[in-house]
Image (cartoon, rainbow, N blue to C red):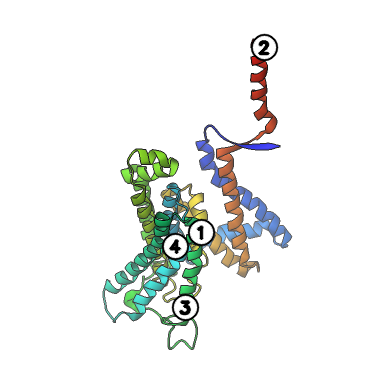
Amino acid sequence: MLNVQPRLESSKLMMWLSPFIAVTLTLAVSSVLFVWLDVSPLKAFQVFVMMPFSDSYNLGELLVKSAPLMLCAVGLALCYRANIWNIGAEGQLLIGAVAASAVAVNADDTSGIGMLLATLIAGMAAGAGWAAIPTWLNRRFHTNIILTTIMLNYIGLYVLLWAVHGPLRDPQGFGFPESQMFADAALLHPLFDSGRASSSIIVAVVIAMVSGVVLFKTLPGFQLRVLGSERAAAKYAGFSEHRLVWGVMLFAGALAGFAGAAEVAGPIGQLVPSVSPGYGYAAIIVAYLGRLNPISVIVASLFMGALYMGSDLAQIELGLPTAVTGLFQGTLLFFLLACDFLIHYRFVPKSALRAPAQTTLVDEKGAA
């Protein structure tokens, strides 16, 4: 029998190698899946890995999918650094999209940047407000943030469905559950002539880099890391746990809300039920793939965006179902968590744990 025992010191090298190990193991498992589906693994990897970077249009679509992942993952990485297990980015993104759409379709016709700013700010405020609910419940009643954020994801989804079937449904839309198209003044216009990538990807990269600097080079970032590694030490040092928890949760919610607003104001241009294919959940994997480092999250987001792009292309090129993406994400998360577990813990035979005690007993008898 084996026992689990904490390691005296975790390997920093393995901390950074583990994402590559997890990706390699995921690719190995995926090869078996492709063979079982009677698809050439080499052809499948070409579609998933190479084709998203093959031309300007695919590259633009890669940026479209990477931007919301990056925004959500940066907020989650900061939460997880502080041992605050926020699983609610998906719901915060959806609520941000609904609030932004409510402003965009109901605002008077205006020109200039004011309408766009109002749309994006509404999304950020709604996302932060949605994150405030589990935060308040946790600080006031000590509820589990994991449970409350997960449940609010489902509530957020039904709020979205209610909005597109009710008050925000386009009266000229022949009954389809979608809002009217946003006015030109409320849109994030494409960066390039071909493709849908908007300036949200630039905003996401800037926020990720600034968040990395704040986390590792400023006092609030240091306080956040101490809170996550040793809560008692943070309290002894006089750090305000209450302020830190509220601050990081509201920031994460605002980023997710901005991601939702940027989706409806950018590549989609209206509110639809499928505004998110699960970006908020995939961002959890992205945060861990980036080792909870906001700057590394940039690369991890591009990788996950390529998986989404590869899934779309695989449906066309190989006839594979969309569920393959979910399978990839689940397998990758499993191996990431397994690597993290083995970095911090080790398996020890029970006999090895009993041996020191037996040796001590023999020594005591000999001394007597």
Q: For marks 3 and 1, give the one nearer the viewer.
A: 1
Say whether residue 252 is visible: no
Residue type marked 1: Leu
Q: Earlier in the sequence, mark 3 or mark 4?
A: 4
Mark in the foreground, 2 or 3: 2
* Residue on which disc 2 sits: 366
The residue depicted at 52 percent of the width and 37 percent of the height is 13
**Other-residue count near label 4 (Cα within 10 Å), few / some / many at <14 / 14–19 / ≥20:** many
Q: What element carries label 3?
A: helix
Ranked by sequence position, the earlier of labels 1 and 4 is: 4
Task: Residue 106 in the image: state x and y as whole percent.
Answer: 34, 80
Q: Distance between the residues labelled 1 and 2?
A: 56 Å
Residue, disc 3: 162
Image quarter (top left, top right, bottom left or bottom right) of the N terminus: top right
Asked whether the residues under the numbered discs 3 and 1 touch, taking CB atoms below 8 Å apart as contact, a structural biologist would say no
Image-based side of 323 in relation to 170, left or right: right
Q: Which of 157 and 185 is in front in this view?
A: 157
Residue matched to label 4: 68
Which of 237/11 is in front?
A: 237
Q: Report the residue marked by disc 1.
A: 147
